[in-house]
Every structure is written in C-alpha cells, then in structure tokens.
Image (cartoon, grey):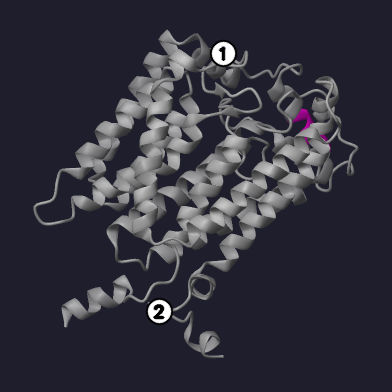
Amino acid sequence: MTEMVYGTIPAQAGDPIIPRWWRTIDKLTMTCVFMLFGIGLLLGLAASPPLAARNGLEPFHYVLRQAFFGGSAMLVMLVMSMMSPTMVRRLGVIGFLLAFVALALLPVFGTDFGKGAVRWYSLGFASFQPSEFLKPGFVVVAAWFMAAAFEIGGPPGRMYSFILTVMICLMLALQPDFGQACLVLFAWGVMYFVAGAPMLLLMGIAGLVVLAGTFSYANSEHFARRIDGFLNPEIDPRTQIGYATNAIREGGFFGVGVGEGQVKWSLPDAHTDFIIAVAAEEYGLVCVLAIIALYAIIVVRSLLRLMKERDPFIRLAGTGLACAFGVQAMINMGVAVRLLPAKGMTLPFVSYGGSSLIAGGIAVGMLLAFTRTRPQGEIGEILLRGRR
C-alpha cells in the first residue's frame, strides 16, 4: 500500500539481490520486451518455414533457433539488469574492446555470405556479427568519456568520444555497412546533445555527414545502388522492397489471415529484415500499430525515468541505449514501407538472428540496469535545494 501511495520504495543496501531487483526494476519496460520476443516467435512460425523448405531443413528449424537465441537473450537481459551501473560500465568497456578488435579483423577473417558486405564471421554452426555487439559497448564507453568531462580537471572526453565515433563509422563504412554507421553516429549525437553540445557544432557535424554521404554515393557502388533504388519513383515488383510493399498493401487493417500470407514465399529475408511485412500482411495494420506502441513505450518510459537521474554517466548511457534501440526499430520499419533506403537492419527482438537477439538483450539489460530506482534525490530536487 505504501508503494501505491508514495511511489517505488527505494532499495536498501542490505536487501537480497532478487527482492531489491524486483522492487527497483522497470517492470513495464521489461514486460514490453518479453511481448516483442513473443510476437517475434509468432511471426517466425509464419515467415521461416518457406525458407527452411528451400534449404531442405525441418519446417521449424529457424523458429527453434530463434527460440534458443531469444531465450538466451532474455536470460542475458535479466542478469545484466541486476548489475550495478559500475559493473555494467566495466563489462561494457571490456565488451567494446573485444567487439572493436573483431570488427577490425573482419576484412581478413570475415565473410559476406554472398550479400556484398563483409559483416560476419562464419562459425560453421552459426554466424557472428561484431557490429551488433559493438553498439551497446560503444554507447557505454562514449558516455563514460563524456561524463568524465564534467569532472573538475577531467579529460576532454567529448573530443575522445568524437574521435572514437569517427573511427568506428569509417570501419563500418568500409564493410560497407552504412546503416550501422548511421546508428552509431546518431547514438553519439544524442548523447552529445544531452551532454550540452552547442547547436552550431551539431549543425556542423550534420554538414560533414552530408558531405560524407555525397562522397560515398560517388565512390561506393553498393551505397549508390541503394540510394538510386530508393529515389526511383517506380518500384520493381520483383525486388524485396516490391514484395514487401505489396504485402503491406494487401494486409489492410486486419490482415489476410493467419498463415494466408504469400510474401514469405517470395522474400528471402522475410524472417529477418522484412519481418514487419509478414506481420502487416497476415495480421494487418492493427498488429503493426501494436508493435510500434511496444517500442514507443520502452523508449519513452526509459527516457522519462532517466530524466530524474543525477549521475551524468547513467543519464548519458541510458539515453544513448534507449534512442539507438528505438531508431533501429524505426529504420527497419521505415525501409519496409519505403520511407528510407534499404539498410539491412533487423527489428529488435522480433527479427530472426542470433547476434541481433543476444546483443539486443545486452543493450536492454544495460538500459534496465540504468533505469532502476536508486536511493538518491531526483535531479530536480537537487537543483531546487541549490537555490535555497
């Protein structure tokens, strides 16, 4: 009753880990993540059997793999959410260093699986995409640098974070993986904005991004082909975008019915990059709006809780993780409805993919750890006390 009247009860230092975690965790955000994973399994049952049949595998081969990787991701998320911000920062730095080395070695040991971009390591039984694991670690490291700049006599953390961001974006662009590069740059820009960056500086960086995009268009056939396809007013119905657009149009408000969709038989990436097209065709606009609402709840609720946080590192890292999570979902769905050029980016917790699922579990686990209720004064109360 006390919690209902006065709000969440602050955790005491001597409480057992599990009860303290349960009282302080953002239960609504965690529930939304589990719901997204459940929707992903449901859509996987519809989207993956045709691919399994084409590859001569059991009908539910990919669904079982998604359940395994997704279950592992949920476990990682729960364990990560129980950690202190200090422990999360330490693990984030270690994970970033390992992913950074793996990303640097991709040109030597990586493979493209015939997709024209060297983004993966082939492990035989599975594949590994370093950029997925790099993102949460990068956000933590960049936030750590920026937070250090607030300390008296601290290092020029903002400059260090910018240099690191440029290095990572160049490495991703060489794969080429412009989608992940844009996502990394966006996460850094949001954190830099929250850290108090001048608007003129952000506008200057935006201008540099436009110049970099122009240079990439002139020198990268992969990049130019995707931009030309996006700008072309006519959609080739035999392309993935054409199939996806037609499926969304056919779905209408309530869909054509469970198992009645046809796009999964034509799209090779129906279970990954274009899973939202399967949802729109079989379950209609209602299902798509429900998925969008779940992502919006996770992002908005996390940002609202972070607004009360007084620790600059937690505030910056949490903001970067929440915004990167939401923008990745927006990019995936934007590509499917042709609002954005093709990026090859998964829909978090819904698309099939071991690297994406587990890395998503790490990122959201970090976010849940940062948004837990802690025994501290809210930042607004501290500012008011300072004026008295």
Q: Is residue 75 above or below residue 137?
A: below
- Where is residue 12 drawn, in percent x and y? 40, 80
Residue linked to disc 2: 14
Circle on res. 116: 1
Depth check, front residue: 237 or 330: 330
Q: Residue at image x 46%, y 82%?
A: 9
The answer to whether any part of residue 388 appears in the image is yes
**Circle 1: element type:** loop
Q: Which region shows up in magenta?
A: 245-250
- Between 302 and 130, the residue placed more toward the observer is 130
Q: Amino acid at mark 2?
A: Gly
Packing grade of label 1 (10 A; few <14, some 14-19, many >=20) is few
Q: Which disc number belongs to residue 355?
A: none
Q: Quadrant of the N terminus?
A: bottom right
Measured Cα–Cα span from mark 1 to mark 2: 54 Å
Q: Residue at x 69, y 19 (%)?
A: 235
Residue 249 highlighted magenta (yes or no)? yes
Residue 365 placement, left or right of 311: right
Q: Secondary structure at mark 2?
A: loop
Disc 1 versus disc 2: nearer the observer? 2
Where is residue 288 drawn, in percent x and y? 71, 47
Looking at the image, residue 39 sits to the left or right of residue 357; the answer is right
Circles 1 and 2: CB distance less than 8 Å?
A: no
| Label 2 neighbour load within 10 Å: few <14, some 14-19, many 20+ | few
Q: Is residue 118 left or right of residue 50?
A: left
Position of residue 51 in the picture relative to residue 343 (left or right):
right
Could you tell me which quadrant the C terminus lies in? bottom left
